[in-house]
Image (cartoon, rainbow, N blue to C red):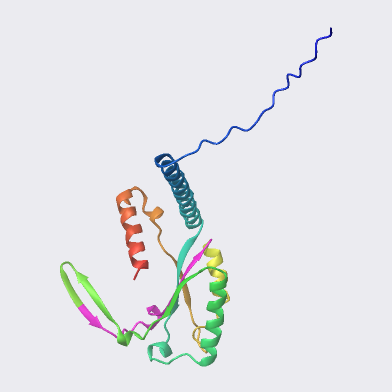
Amino acid sequence: MQEAEVNHEIVRRPMPEPKLVGVERTALTRRHRLHLLFNGLSIQALAVRQSIESLTFQRRNTMRFMIIVKASQDSEAGVMPSEQLLTDMGNYNEELAKAGILVSADGLHPSSKGARVRFSGETRSVIDGPFAETKELIAGYWIWEVKSKEEAIEWVKRCPNPMPGTEAEIEIRQIFCSEDFGAEFTPQLREQEERIREQAKKH
């Protein structure tokens, strides 16, 4: 008699999932939620860190300038700008904003509405305006953040004459950054400066 052939194929069936009841299911759910929570926090923390590093990189590769509009006899006399000049300056400021370099901009009242405080040792004396040296006075300013002094100069050249009918002058001055102060500007002082900047943004 011939022996019958036996098929030894192994049939693989998926293992049934364990049934979780009561405390086991609750514990697994909590672990899963905690995993998602901390994983999400880690992603958020990484995004914040990358954002800070990006801002730091941008700050290191740009510099800030104060663009100073010198006063004139008209500005010291309180003569207000014409509608045309206001329009031209508004369009110019809009260009600065679109270019991403404008930080702030303001015009100043005549020195007759100002004062100076003179320091002499421990003594403080107040001098009321107006002040005589018109060419050394300021009528307004911008704060720009640009890549170089040359870029600032090019933007100033495009500015409308701030004092039409006169030989106006705009001065460009670079603003110090923390890296300029060297080792004397300790980590504690740097932290204080950042804290002050953050507080100032809230007000």
Which quadrant does the N terminus fall into?
Answer: top right
In the rendered image, residue 61, in percent from the top left (x then y), is placed at 51, 56
In the rendered image, residue 30, in percent from the top left (x then y), is placed at 42, 45
Residue 88, quarter of picture: bottom right
Question: Which residue is most to the front?
Answer: 1
Residue lying at 40% horizontally and 60% vertically, measured from the top left: 176
Question: Which residue is most to the right?
Answer: 1
Which quadrant does the C terminus fall into?
Answer: bottom left
Question: Which residue is most to the left?
Answer: 122
In the rendered image, residue 156, in percent from the top left (x then y), is placed at 54, 73
Left/right placement of residue 128 relative to residue 201 reads left
**Residue 130 visible from this viewpoint:** no
Residue 174, quarter of picture: bottom left
Question: Which residue is most to the top?
Answer: 1
In the rendered image, residue 122, in percent from the top left (x then y), is placed at 15, 67
Residue lying at 57% horizontally and 69% vertically, measured from the top left: 99
Residue lying at 45% horizontally and 45% vertically, measured from the top left: 29
Is 135 in the magenta? yes
Q: How many numbered dots are placed on residues in this image?
A: 0
- Magenta stretch in the rendered image: 126-147
Left/right placement of residue 111 relative to residue 5 reads left
**Residue 66 visible from this viewpoint:** yes
Left/right placement of residue 83 relative to residue 111 reads right
Residue lying at 48% horizontally and 61% vertically, measured from the top left: 63
Is 13 in the magenta? no
